[in-house]
């Protein structure tokens, strides 16, 4: 058995996969519908949406297979992601030097046929595959391969929508937190401004009550402007 090589941009690839926050999530009908259609079109017993992290392949959706993940070193899909431009096809794994002694071939689930289309992110990195498998040797027609490739693009459309939704939700949470911080700042700033302003208003009133007789008309007008300006500023602060 030949173990799969790491992708040439493995660190970037894993970071891209992590950005979707999809690993170990619950089954979803949108993905299950696609694997069901893929198995039907290709006439296979098994169909998977497989995502490859650093140590395993994990199945977001699976038809005809009970396990939810397998070790990366045994994964056909870990080979497939290294050929992003083509559908990775193994007509008969029992006679393929890369897979003939693979535990997935020699024991349950006794895989023989495999065809996988890489799931490519917007930044050109493979996250995993949409694949179909069977317990007997098989070939796919050009029409089946074209349909499988089209379905792989639909998987990525759903994943990208999920990522966009998560980004918007995070942005909304951040905005809400910023608004709370702004409210707290406004409360503190208003409190700190009102204290000296109240002092100005009080002193202006005392000056008017006790010394207005000693002020000429211009002085009284200036004092009145101070009082009005203080009241206006207090109203703005309260607002």
Image: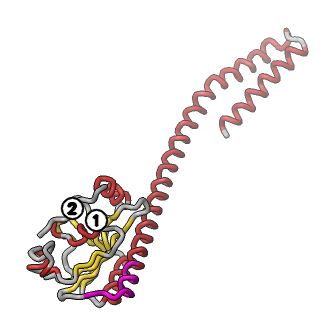
State which tag comes first along the sequence, 1 or 2.
Answer: 2
**Label 1 neighbour load within 10 Å: few <14, some 14-19, many 20+:** many
Badge 2 is on which residue?
Answer: 5
Task: Give the position of the N terminus as an image quadrant.
Answer: bottom left
Q: Position of residue 2 (x, y in %)?
A: 14, 67
Q: Position of residue 162 (x, y in %)?
A: 43, 66
Residue 200 placement, left or right of 117: right
Residue 209 placement, left or right of 25: right
Q: Are marks 1 and 2 in contact (CB under 8 Å)?
A: yes
**Label 2 neighbour load within 10 Å: few <14, some 14-19, many 20+:** few
Reply above or below: 68 against 191: below
Secondary structure of the residue carrying tag 2 is loop
Badge 1 is on which residue?
Answer: 82
Q: Position of residue 94 (x, y in %)?
A: 12, 81
Question: Which residue reaches farthest right?
Answer: 217
**Nearer to me, 185 or 19:** 19
**Nearer to me, 63 or 182:** 63
Q: Which residues are magenta?
A: 139-149
Which residue is painted at 79% across and 17% down in the image? 208
Query: What main secondary structure does the magenta stretch of the protein show?
Result: helix
User: Which disc is residue 224 wearing?
Assistant: none
């Amino acid at each position: 058995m030949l173990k799969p090589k790491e992708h040439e941009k493995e660190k970037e690839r894993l970071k891209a996969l992590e950005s979707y926050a999809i690993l170990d999530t619950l089954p979803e009908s949108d993905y299950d519908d696609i694997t069901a259609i893929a198995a039907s079109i290709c006439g296979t017993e098994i169909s998977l949406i497989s995502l490859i992290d650093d140590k395993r392949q994990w199945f977001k959706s699976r038809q005809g297979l009970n396990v939810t993940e397998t070790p990366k070193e045994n994964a056909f899909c870990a080979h497939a992601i290294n050929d992003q431009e083509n559908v990775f096809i193994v007509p008969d794994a029992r006679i393929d030097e890369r897979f003939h002694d693979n535990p997935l071939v020699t024991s349950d689930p006794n895989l023989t046929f495999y065809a996988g289309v890489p799931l490519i992110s917007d930044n050109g990195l493979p996250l995993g595959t949409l694949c179909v498998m069977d317990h007997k040797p098989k070939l796919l027609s050009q029409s089946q391969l074209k349909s499988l490739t089209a379905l792989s693009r639909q998987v990525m459309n759903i994943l990208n929508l999920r990522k966009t939704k998560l980004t918007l939700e995070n942005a909304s949470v951040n905005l809400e937190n910023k608004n709370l911080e702004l409210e707290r700042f406004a409360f503190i700033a208003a409190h700190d401004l009102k204290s000296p302003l109240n002092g100005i208003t009080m002193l202006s009133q005392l000056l008017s009550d006790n010394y207005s007789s000693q002020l000429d008309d211009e002085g009284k007008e200036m004092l009145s402007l101070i009082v009005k300006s203080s009241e206006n500023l207090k109203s703005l602060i309260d607002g």
